[in-house]
Amino acid sequence: MTMRLNEKQALFFLKQNGIDISRRTYFRHKTKVESLKWQRLMHIAEFFTDQHLQRIDKLELVEHLMWSEYEKEKSPFKRVNILRSIVNMQPYLSNYYGATRFVLEKRLKIDPIKKPEGLPQ
C-alpha cells in the first residue's frame, strides 16, 4: 500500500521477498491493515506530546553542543561552518515552538499571547 503497487505488482513483490501468499490472503491482510488506520492514528496522537518534546530537547542539545564546539574551534573557516549549521537548524526549532503554541492554543483554548501595548494587534 505504501509503495502504491497494484494487486499483481504487490503479489510479485511479496513473492520476490520470500512471502508467497494467495490473492485471497493478500486482500484479507490488506483489509486488516486498512481497518487499523484509525488505531494507528490514535496511537500516534497518544504519544505526540512525548515525541514532540523529545525532538525539541534533542534539537536544543544539538545546538548547545554546536556552540561548545564553536568555542573550542580555532580555525575561522570551521567556526563559520559551525555558525552556519547553527543558523540552519533554527527553522526546525522555530517550527517545533510554533507547533507547540498552536496545539496549546487549540487544545487548551487559551488566548494567544498578547503583544505589548502600542503594537498593532
Image: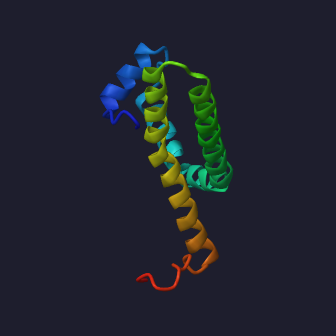
Q: Nearer the viewer, residue 60 or 79?
A: 79
Residue 84 visible within the image: yes
Name of the residue lying farthest toward the bottom: 118
Q: Residue at x 60, y 68 (%)?
A: 104
Q: In the image, 94: left or right of 8?
A: right
Quarter of the rendering containing residue 12: top left
Give the answer, above or below, for where 88 lies relative to 107: above
Q: Nearer the viewer, residue 98 or 30?
A: 98
Q: In the image, 51: left or right of 13?
A: right
Q: How is the image coloured?
A: rainbow
Q: Quadrant of the N terminus?
A: top left
Position in image of residue 19 (x %, y %)? 49, 19
Number of marks in picture: 0
Q: Quadrant of the C terminus?
A: bottom left
Q: Nearer the viewer, residue 110 or 11?
A: 110
Position in image of residue 118 (x %, y %)? 46, 85
Position in image of residue 15 (x %, y %)? 42, 17
Position in image of residue 36 (x %, y %)? 56, 49
Q: Residue at x 61, y 79 (%)?
A: 110
Q: Nearer the viewer, residue 14 or 116?
A: 116
Residue 24 visible within the image: no
Q: Residue at x 38, y 25 (%)?
A: 11
Give the answer, above or below, for where 72 lies relative to 63: above
Give the answer, above or below, for where 73 lies relative to 111: above
Q: Residue at x 57, y 73 (%)?
A: 105
